[in-house]
Amino acid sequence: MNPESSETYINHPTWGLLYRICMVDENQELFTTLYAQRLFFLVITDAKGVKFQPIGRTEARMLLENRLRNLRRTGQAQEYDQLQSIFQRTFQ
């Protein structure tokens, strides 16, 4: 299954259920609060466990735009289209 298309959720100790928007890097994923989609977190996974780094809406948008550019550049059309739809729902 394509990692961009599978819905992934994670439980934040304070904010509850978070929804994965996309992969950012090998061990980094962008998540947002499930319902309001107003709070964003960079979730970093390493040998020590999972870390939640709160980030602003502008930074989250930039990370998502960078991911879209990478997908377009590498010719991953299906993943690009799916992420473009998520981008529009989240930021427009």
Image (spheres, rainbow, N blue to C red):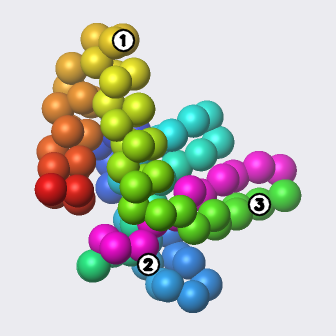
> Can residue 72 be seen in this snapshot?
yes
> Can residue 8 be seen in this snapshot?
no
Q: Which residue is drawn at 53% across and 62% down?
A: 55
Q: Is residue 34 above or below residue 9?
A: below
Q: Give yes or no for residue 6 being in the magenta stretch.
A: no
Q: Name the residue under label 1.
A: 74
Q: Mark 3 points at which residue?
A: 49
User: Which residues lie in the magenta part?
Assistant: 37-47
Tell me residue 5's x, y (percent).
Answer: 28, 42
Seen as rendered, the residue at the extreme right is 48
Q: What residue type is labelled 2?
A: Leu
Q: How far apart are marks 2 and 3 (CA)?
A: 18 Å
Q: How many marks?
A: 3
Q: Is mark 1 on a helix, strand or loop?
A: loop
The numbered mark, 2 or 1, whose residue comes first in the sequence reads: 2
Q: Is residue 47 above or below residue 80?
A: below
Disc 2, disc 1: CB below 8 Å? no
Q: Nearer the viewer, residue 77 or 40?
A: 40
The numbered mark, 1 or 3, whose residue comes first in the sequence reads: 3
Disc 1, disc 3: CB below 8 Å? no
Q: How far apart are marks 1 and 3 (CA)?
A: 30 Å
Q: Is mark 3 on a helix, strand or loop?
A: strand
Tell me residue 36's x, y (percent).
Answer: 28, 79
Is residue 5 shown left or right of residue 40? left
Q: Quadrant of the N terminus?
A: top left
Q: Is residue 73 above or below residue 42?
A: above
Q: Which amino acid does label 3 sit on?
A: Gly
